[in-house]
Each structure stands twice: as structure tokens, then as C-alpha cells.
Image: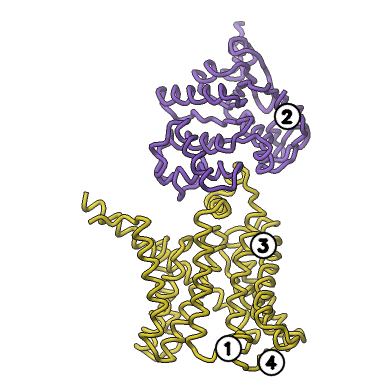
Amino acid sequence: MNTEVTPARRGILVLALIAAVMGYPFVFTSNYAIELGMLVLLGAFLGQAWNVAGGFAGQFSFGHAAFFGTGAYCSAILVSTYGVNPWLAFALAAVSGAVVGGIVGALSFRFGLRGSYFALITLAFAEILRVLADSVPITRGGLGILISADPGWKNLQFESSTGVYYFAAVLCAISLLIAYWLKTSRFGARLAAIRENEAAASALGVNVFWQKVHCLVLSGAMSAVGGAFYVQKYLFIDPYLAYNINRSVEMLLISMIGGAGTIFGPFVGALAIGLIGEGTRALSTAPGLSLVVYGLILILIIGFLPQGLIGLTSKLRRKGASNAS
Amino acid sequence: MLLEVDRLCKSFGGLQAVSDASVRLPEGGIVALIGPNGAGKTTLFASIAGFIAPDSGTVRFAGTDITGWKPHRICMAGMVRTFQITQPFSRLSVHENIMVGAYARTANAREAADRAEAVARQVGMHHLLQTESINLTVAARKRLELARALATQPRVLLLDEVMAGLNPTEIQEIVDVVKAIRTAGVSILLIEHVMQAVMSLAEKIYVLSQGAIIAEGLPQEVTSNTAVIEAYFGKKKVAA
């Protein structure tokens, strides 16, 4: 059987995916199921945000919550304290994430931090921001910020869970387009070159420092959009929710389990993590069981499938091809 | 002179890797840098291409002082190096590898892809375009180094032992490729151990030993130079 991925087949797959995402709320109509679907889509979006830096450029961050939380706070403060229009606040949240991404990137890369050192410094940045959010007046410290509920398009709040679901689907689609752009553009090619070999990249005219900073700006902006979305959905944010290390870990888990550096990896990863979460909850009510399972799966993936679940499909395809020939 | 290196010095701790080295490469020329292992050839190359900041001395390229510039800036100015120990982007295909070089001159993916394909043809590896570069043989990796550098459309190509580890047939193929590149108007400075290649390519040879240029001149002159022979084989014992 010919299992090659032709453009036509890819097109059919993408159309099927769109149909599945669009049709899901009509098949699974309970609020619980729709909420679950929304969380998968948000996870796919956030995983893609991490993937831009960690997957495409190989800049392995352990602190993407820094950007998520900043976006969440930026939009919450603007809306509740300054009465800014939520749509505008949403856009400004993206800018805030871009700025924090730029600062974190410029500082870390200026001093040549790579690999695990970069991972640790990003973790430290997220922790610093959490402590700050806990203590400065503008975030109202540990009390957190509440946004008054006033559902409607004007306020970027949704009466039905379906509305939120489709909003998450749109964000997810945009993140996939960004990933596609990275796979086909000069910027993406340069990030891949940096991931593979920084010295060779710079010899070939790539300004490694600037490209890496740009990459964190983009990744930070996307993560912040995720944070702003979170605030608009739950209408509440506090330092723990914003800058939780679990958020950072979840983002990288989703991307790595699905396939870091691939377009659909984060989507597959979010789906897998969602299913595993539901599965473990159904099996046992012991708290934290899902985390144990995630950990085990991550170890297996890193050990045997560096390309993630997406890599599994191409591996099987190669196997099928060599068996057939 | 297209490239002028003047009295360049570089030491690592107490080790003087390059001392007072001056090298000149004329427009359209092809010049070789030879010397025993550990003579400082690669350090000199790295200093010229911006990978190492020299302690003193200047590097002038096309009339501009580029001493201390970063590698990417030097590449954009028109001078590019290859690596002795090949540095492929392992998980990218040959085509994608070369495209990174081509992107130095265009932001357009289509143009970069076409340019990369043309360069691959030029160095004789177009049949390998879709191969992941981690799966290439040593000879093919050397060609890939050359192709990537060439794709940046340089005026000066710095080739660091592109023939080391190749068999005579492969060497002859690369020699022909390098000759063609030079004919196309690219000036070349090369480090090489393979004398077969050096003698058939270079118009002028510099000999580096213990960090210093000990001889320079035409290939025939240099190979019969006593200092050079001593650097490679040691001093002749004087009969008592």
C-alpha cells in the first residue's frame, strides 16, 4: 500500500480535522464534553506557543508560564482596573507577552545560555514573576483579580460553552497557520538551522542572537494570548494560576508528546494528554495519578520517540514501506 | 587585494596559536595555506571569519576593516567559511541545509529552493537533495559544506580541509568543482593537507608553522624551501 504523504492526502487530512473540530460540539453536546474539547484546543494552542521556541528553534524553555501569566494579568488588569475594552486588552496582552519574551530572550541569549541553562533561567523568570504578582499592589497580590461577568461579543465573554469552544478553535487554527509558516519560511528555516547547529548557522549569515530573540517574542506573544483567553473564560486570575510551573510543564509536555518541531505535534499531544487525563480519572480517583502517567509517557517518548507521536506515524510508514519493497 | 590579513596574533592562555601572520588574497585568486598539524591554520581561519576575536592585527575585506565582526555579518559582506569538522544541520535534508545558505541573499522560499538546487548540481550532489544530512558519507558531507557556503553567493570562500579523508577519485572531483567555482569568479583561500590538490589548485602558498608564516611563494618554490621541509620533517642531521 502506498502510504506516502502527498499534498492531496494532507489536504484531506486537514479538511477532516477541521470537520471533526467543528462538528464535535454537535456530537458531544454535554457541557462537560464541550469544556473538555475546549481545554484540548487551548492546550494545543499553548503547546504550539511552546513549540515555536522549544520545537522549531530548539530553545527548551521550562518557564513559559511567565508569558502565559503576564498575558493573563495584562488583560485582567486592563479590563477590571482601567475599564479597557476586552478586545483591545486581548491584543495588548499579546504585546505584553512579546515584550516579556523579548526581555527574557535578550538577557538569556546575550549571556550565551543554552540547553539546560536556558531552561533553568526561564524557570527562574516565571518564579520571579509569580513572587512579584504575589506582592505588588497592581495585581492585588494573593487576592487575585476578578472580572465582572457581562457576557456578550462586545466583552469577549461567551454565554454558552460552545462559544468559548469555537473561540479556542480559532486560536488553535491560527497557531497551526503560524507553525505552517515556520515550516515554509526563511525565519523558520533559520530557527531550524539554529536548533541543529548554531556555529554553522552563523557562518551562513544567520544572526543567531536576533533570530532567537525574535522567536521568543513570537512564542511569548502566543503564550500571552493563551493567558488572556484563560482570563476571559474563567474571569479570575491569581499569582498561582498565572505563573504555575505546572502550566510551563504542561505546555512542553503537550508539544513533546505530540512531536516537537512539527506542525501538528502539539495538537496530537493535547489530544493524547486530554484522553490520558480522562482515562486515569475514570480508572481511579487518586489525585495526581494522571501526573504519574504523564511522567511515564514522557520518559518513554524521550527514550524511544524523540519525534513524539507524530514521529511514530512516519516511523510506521517507513517500516511499512520497507516491508512492502 | 580582496582580502588582506595583517600581522594577526591570537593566543590561548600561554599558547601563541597565531603570531604576526599576514596573508593576502587577490581578487579572483586561489591561495593555499599549508602547514603541519597544530600550526594554527584553523585558528587563523576562524579569526578571519569572525569566530575568534584576534588579540591584535587587522583583517580587511574589500577595503573594509572587518576585524572583530561577527561571522554572520562577515558572511553577509561576502566572505564565508566551511568547517574542517563538518557541521551539517543533521536532521535537515541536504536541500534544506543548502537553502539556509541561499536564504542569506533572498527571503523568498521559492528562490532559495531553486538556488539551492542549482548549487547542489554545481557541486554534484543534486541526486542527494532529499537525503537527511545525518545519513551522508564523509565525502558527501564535505560537498555539503561547500554547497552551503557557495549558496550564500560569496566573493571569498574560505575552505578548511574540504578534501581531508577523501579517496583520490573523490579528491579529483572536488578539485574540479573548486576550479569551476573559481572560474565563476569566486576568490578562494584554502587550508589543505592533500598536496595533490594544493599543487594543482593554488597559485600561491603560505606555509604556517608554530603560528608563524615561515614561507610564501609559488607552489614549486615553497616545496623546495628548506625551512618548509624542516617544519614538516625536522632538521637534517649534520654529519660530524
User: At 65% across and 43% down in the image, what residue appears?
Assistant: B72
Q: Nearer the viewer, mark 3 or mark 2?
A: 2
Please give the label number shown on residue A105: 3
Q: In the rendered image, which residue does mark 4 sit on? A: A143
Residue nearer the viewer, B15 or B125: B125
Residue A247 image point, x, y percent: 55, 77
- Which element type, helix, strand or loop, lies under badge 4? helix
Residue tagged by mark 1?
Answer: A234
The CA distance from mark 3 to mark 2 is 35 Å
Residue type at numbered disc 3:
Gly
Q: Quadrant of residue B46?
A: top right
Residue B73 higher or lower than A97, as above or below: above
Q: Which residue is mark 2?
A: B62
Residue at image position (65%, 49%) is: A207
Q: How is the image coloured?
A: by chain
Q: Position of residue B108 (x, y in %)?
A: 56, 47
The residue type indicated by label 4 comes to Leu
Image height of A273 relative to B76, above or below: below
Q: Given the image, on which type of amino acid does mark 2 rest?
A: Ala
Do tags 1 and 3 sit on the same chain? yes
Cα–Cα gap, marks 1 and 2: 62 Å
Label 3 and label 4: CA atoms lie apart by 30 Å
Crowding at mark 4 (Cα within 10 Å: few <14, some 14-19, many 20+): few
The answer to the question of whether label 4 and label 1 lie on touching residues, with beta carbons closer than 8 A, is: no
Q: Earlier in the sequence, mark 4 or mark 1?
A: 4
